[in-house]
Amino acid sequence: MAEKIRSESKREMLTRAAVDLAHRQGYRKTTLADLAASAEVPLGNIYYYFKSKDDIGAAILSRRAEEFAQLQAQMAKMSDPLQRLIAFVEMTIANAPIVAEHGCPLGTLSGEMRKEGGSLAERSTALLADPMSWMARQFAKMGRAADADDLALQLQSSLQGASLLAQSLGRADLLEREGRRLIGWLSGLEPGRG
């Protein structure tokens, strides 16, 4: 039992390190040696937990999916779908300095894995598609079912575009400004306003 717990904790350490490294330096550039050094695990031990780099990629995708599921559960505690959407944008604004330095953790990883191709490419689409579907559900709950998908596309496109500009230009303020504009736009969609 103790060995299983140690095994899970080492795998957890490796997964956390892989998620961090993939965001900071990119999935493609992250080597097994980088992962071993970051997790403070001997290089040869990585193969005990992950048989290939694709297995590491799958673990990263699973972790990002878990993180989004946790975020959804946290947001579900808010009774108002508009407030959920605003909270999502506010979270993005709060992360603007990190995004300006390393890119959007979901958008950058998804784009990189799509370029790699293979089995991870298809799975990586969920990184952006799942949040966009969640956004569409929030818009539908606001009484905007007829254009919920279009509104979700607009919100996701604006956030991803501003994230790319913030990273490319090294300017967190661009994402912050776009985030504030989006909050105003979302507030204007509330029934009875506008």
Image (cartoon, grey):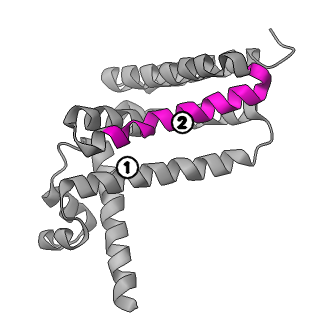
Please give left or right for residue 35 compared with residue 131 in the image.
Answer: left
The amino acid sitting under disc 1 is Leu
The amino acid sitting under disc 2 is Pro
Q: Nearer the viewer, residue 105 or 172?
A: 105
Q: In the image, residue 37 lies at what x, y percent?
A: 19, 63
Please give left or right for residue 71 compared with residue 13 in the image.
Answer: right
Please give left or right for residue 81 compared with residue 161 in the image.
Answer: right
Badge 2, how many Cα within 10 Å: few under 14, some, many 20+? some
Where is the N terminus found, in terms of image quarters? bottom left
Q: Secondary structure at mark 1?
A: helix
Query: What residue is pinned by disc 2?
Result: 131
Q: Residue 93: tell me if it is visible.
A: no
Badge 1, how many Cα within 10 Å: few under 14, some, many 20+? many
Specify the quadrant of the image occupied by residue 107: top left
Q: In the image, residue 96 lies at what x, y percent?
A: 47, 32
Assess whether residue 49 is covered by the magenta stretch: no
Q: Which mark is residue 40?
A: none
Please give left or right for residue 125 compared with residue 194 in the image.
Answer: left
Residue lying at 26% horizontally and 57% vertically, measured from the top left: 56
Specify the quadrant of the image occupied by residue 188: top right
Above or below, 74 against 136 in this view is: below
Q: Which mark is residue 61?
A: 1
Marks 1 and 2, Cα distance to the nearest angstrom? 14 Å
Q: Residue furthest bottom?
A: 1
Q: Secondary structure at mark 2?
A: helix
Q: Residue furthest top?
A: 194
Q: In the image, residue 22 lies at what x, y percent?
A: 29, 46
Above or below, 11 against 68 in this view is: below
Residue lying at 77% horizontally and 26% vertically, measured from the top left: 142
Q: Nearer the viewer, residue 125 or 27?
A: 125
Magenta residues? 122-144
Give the number of marks.
2
